[in-house]
Image: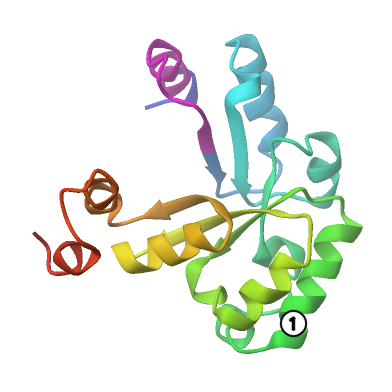
Amino acid sequence: MLLADALAIFRRQSHLQLLNCDLKDANLAGQVMDLAQRSGLADKIILTGTISALEQRRWPRHVWRNVETLLPEVNFDQSLNDHAMFTQMLKQAKKEGCQWLNLPFQLLHPVNLALLKDTDFHLSVWTARDVATTAVLLANGAANVTSLAAHAYCRTMEGGLSVEQAQMGH
């Protein structure tokens, strides 16, 4: 499916709020935003993935920065328990004018969540594996959580399941 086709489908689904375009290659943001503009959907597009500082400055409301684009020299395993690296990433995000951070849930243990609370960043998280993790992230200020357990989480919010039942796959 082409992006133009996806945008046409999205436009017909008026209940959908935002479309996350997770860019896997560099220098695609301009093409995506141009196509979204022509489709009348520019206000609904979120750009994540391979985004540069220049693209961040050009579309600050649309870019949700991933840690690996802010600190490309740091590998994921290194970043998990390195609080100095996390603080460095927050400083780099501020320097580049980030409004949103799009972070893997594994980075958001209590120490890093506490560091984030002292910032003005909006938080998007990927990919929480279960209902309990999703609930904790939302309770700690995440505005968006991509989750493998989205359906079960919705059922807990509707009162149909407890978190424990959802964890067991009911």
Residue where numbered disc 1 is placed: 85
Q: Position of residue 137 (x, y in %)?
A: 49, 63
Question: Which residue is found at the position 13% from the left and 69% from the top?
Answer: 168
Q: Quadrant of the C terminus?
A: bottom left
> For residue 57, which quarter of the picture?
top right
Q: Position of residue 100 (x, y in %)?
A: 70, 50
**Is residue 85 in view?**
yes
Q: Position of residue 62 (x, y in %)?
A: 69, 36
Question: Which residue is found at the position 44% from the left and 66% from the top?
Answer: 136
**Is residue 72 in view?**
no
Q: Quadrant of the N terminus?
A: top left
43 and 121: which is toward the camera = 121
Q: Is residue 110 one of those drawn in magenta?
A: no
SS at mark 1 in the image: helix
Q: Report the number of numbered marks.
A: 1
In the picture, measured across the screen, residue 56 lies left or right of residue 81, that is right
111 and 40: which is toward the camera = 111
Q: Which residues are magenta?
A: 5-20
The three-letter code of the residue at mark 1 reads Met
Q: Position of residue 161 (x, y in %)?
A: 16, 55
Question: Which residue is found at the position 39% from the left and 68% from the top?
Answer: 133
Q: Is residue 7 one of those drawn in magenta?
A: yes
| Mark 1 neighbour density, 10 Å: few (under 14) some (14–19) many (20 or more) | some
Q: Residue furthest right?
A: 95
Examine the rendered structure and indicate whether residue 59 appears above or below residue 16. below
Examine the rendered structure and indicate whether residue 168 appears above or below residue 16. below
Examine the rendered structure and indicate whether residue 63 appears above or below residue 110. above
> For residue 33, which quarter of the picture?
top right
In the picture, measured across the screen, residue 58 lies left or right of residue 100, that is right
Q: Residue furthest front?
A: 159
